[in-house]
Image (cartoon, rainbow, N blue to C red):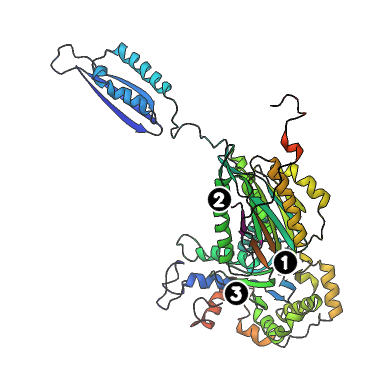
Amino acid sequence: MTRDIDCAWAGPWTWVGCLNKSSGKSRQAQAPTIVMFLVQQDTDTGLLFLFRNLTEFLSLGEHSSLNFITQLMESIQAKQGLVGPNDPIQRTQLPYVTGTSVVALKYKDGILMAADMGGSYGSTIRYKSVERIKPIGKHSLLGASGEISDFQELLRNLDELILYDNMWDDGNSLGPKELHSYLTRVMYNRRNKFDPLWNSLVLGGVKNGQKYLGMVSMIGVNFEDSHVATGFGNHLARPILRDEWHENLSYEDGVKLLEKCMRVLLYRDRSAVNKLQIAKITEEGTTISQPYALKTFWGFTAFQNPTAGAEGSW
Amino acid sequence: MFRNQYDTDVTTWSPAGRLFQVEYAMEAVKQGSAAIGLRSKTHVVLGCVNKANSELSSHQKKIFKVDDHIGVAIAGLTADGRVLSRYMRSECINYSYTYESPLPVGRLVVQLADKAQVCTQRSWKRPYGVGLLVAGLDEKGAHLYYNCPSGNYFEYQAFAIGSRSQAAKTYLERRFENFSESTREDLIKDALMAIRETLQGETLKSSICTVAVVGAGEPFHILDQETVQKLIDSFEIAGTEEGPAAAPDSAAEGGSAAEGGAASEQGAPADEGVAPMDI
């Protein structure tokens, strides 16, 4: 008696078949019996088990064949860890390298935007020269906090978008308002795929004498305002801006106000670093400053023993 | 029945370098009742002649609003025109969903032309039998385009398509140099005058024409019949006298607007030797 074993690949499942054939010489010729079973294609563990035990399998009786199948199925289920093509899709659930707050405001002639250059790997400040403010097209500035690589992917997308926009060469161009709307759609679309771009974005710009400043969150929430801040900035910088911002800020006063915000963030946000860039966009165009540091003073009594009076903290 | 051995399908070249099926499609544009368009720096006006198929029916709509900033007037197969208008509407609405701003007219026109071009290069398709005058506004100002079945498109200061459009073109050619600075009202007046040129002696009434306007601070809209009639009366252009240009041109066109199929045979000798893709 011989047994043949073969498998047929069909979609994600594989048929493995075993054929019992009585040898022609035997008098009581047995009818050939076929045993077939399904194996998921990606379960190489299962197939490995099958072939490793091929010799043993060929000498099994029908009853033990069933037993063998059970073992095979168990070995498939035991497989753990690796993701196969038929397993549920897994998404990045957490950001890896992140940037902290972006602060931006409207001033007399346009928009000012500030962001530090730290890149945190978890809570470790791993990178110190991450540029988080970039010009998009002729009329817009984009600042991002959150996952740095997601921001970089977004920048590549936007580069392409602007390129195709320019290729029309018809005098029309995407302004800050259009880009803000576009980003809103992209962010909301990605969150609906349960695969969000892990960023808070600040979009500012000037086109045809119109100043524009808006924000988009990682789930697509968006709004316009005269001043905006992401992350910790939303808690620590916005109150300052609400007190001190006004429509006719000069460039110098605008920068001073942003530096005040960034200094507070530097003191209180552990992810902030003392190396920042301030960007300006006006009708004339975009300028992004060289990185620089703020003057700090750590001798305040409140800094000497920061937990004094905070019961329960160490 | 066939004009020659090279016109049985759209992808077959004639030795002279022509695509007859495409030219027949452009012939269909000439058969349709006339549509005209003209623009100033800030406004575009579209106009068309409404012809009922029979005494018992109403006429078909020939001017469509695509979006607040874009509208079209068509001549040729109305059914094809409606399909293309729907395409344009959908493009506009998709653009404004993504960017919350109006789709630039020129870009829509290119997309439309590309769509028409595909039909001139696929054996299992037929070209659209409709010409479109696309009027619109974008950040570069007011625009008027003509899209034809061949996939070509042209930008114009003023243009007319459809039957007896040559008369309207002659009128517009005489006056187009002033259009740039025209007021909205002057544009409408010239539109009505141009429409009248195509009527061949018939009285200009609001019941046989449609006028639409788009301009700075004025979303595309079709003027209602009452308004048009008032304008006609106030301009005193209803007169039944033969328009000066109408007589010779209508002869050239074979006076064939009404007699569908016969016209293509009559029209044919006239444009023999014309470069294939010319309008």
- Give the residue pinned by disc 1: A208
How far from the left and from the top, in percent, is residue B5? Answer: 41, 72
Locate residue A102, reporting x and y percent: 68, 49
Dot 1 lies on which element?
loop
Between the residue at mark 3 and the residue at mark 1, the CA separation in whole angstroms equals 28 Å
Q: Amino acid at mark 2?
A: Gln
Does the segment drawn in magenta span residue A281?
Answer: no
Whether residue A37 sits left or right of residue B107 in the image: it is left
For disc 3, the chain is B
Label ID, residue A152: 2
Is B266 placed left or right of A274 in the picture?
left
**Which comes sooner in the sequence, label 1 or label 2?**
2
**Residue A132 belongs to the span the image colors magenta:** yes
- Between A169 and B97, the one nearer to me in the picture: A169
Give me the residue at 56% from left, 74% from top.
B262
Residue under pointer 3: B154
Spatial distance from mark 1 to mark 2, Cα to Cα? 28 Å
Residue in view at x 55 percent, y 75 percent: B264
Q: Specify the subunit that label 1 lies on.
A: A
Magenta stretch prevailing secondary structure: loop
Range covered by the magenta-colored residues: A129-139
